[in-house]
Amino acid sequence: MHIECNHGYNARMTKQELFTLVGGGPSAVARIFGIRPQAVSQWSDPIPDSRVFELRGRRPDLFQAPDPATTQEAADA
């Protein structure tokens, strides 16, 4: 799944934006980072920039811009 995301490496991302990006809540995020959901719940809001940077490394697919051809095909359907 590709989600259009305008977050740069230094951009602030809220927890809600993070949950939308990964398609789940604290448990889904925790699985990506290899930590407990309770740890995710304790993150500040917006989440630390270091975690956004780490997420880009672990799941770069979440940050790729959608293919314009695919986006247009979906809009035409």
Image (cartoon, rainbow, N blue to C red):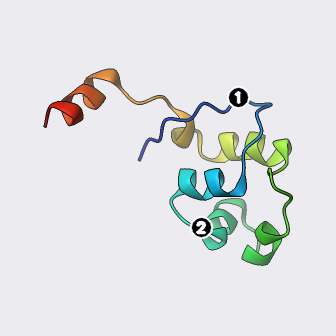
Q: Which amino acid does the dot numbered 1 rest on?
A: Gly
Q: Is residue 25 left or right of residue 71?
A: right
The residue labelled by disc 2 is 28
Mark nearer the viewer, 2 or 1: 1
Check the image and report above or below for 26 versus 16.
Answer: below
> Nearest the camera: 37 or 47?
47
Q: Along the horizontal axis of the image, is 71 left or right of 53?
A: left
Could you say whether the residue bearing mark 1 is in a helix, strand or loop?
loop
Check disc 1: other Cα within 10 Å, few if <14, some if 14-19, many if 20+: few
User: Amino acid type of disc 2?
Assistant: Ala
Q: Is residue 76 above or below residue 44?
A: above
The tag on residue 72 is: none
Q: List x then y, in percent, for residue 66.
A: 41, 30
Q: Residue furthest left?
A: 77
Q: Quadrant of residue 44?
A: bottom right
The disc, 2 or 1, on the residue closer to the chain's N-terminal end is 1
Residue 25 placement: quadrant: bottom right
Question: Decide: marks 2, 1 in contact (CB < 8 A)?
Answer: no
- Residue 28, x across and y down, in percent: 59, 67
Residue in the image at 60% along x and 59% along y: 19
Q: Which residue is mark 1?
A: 8
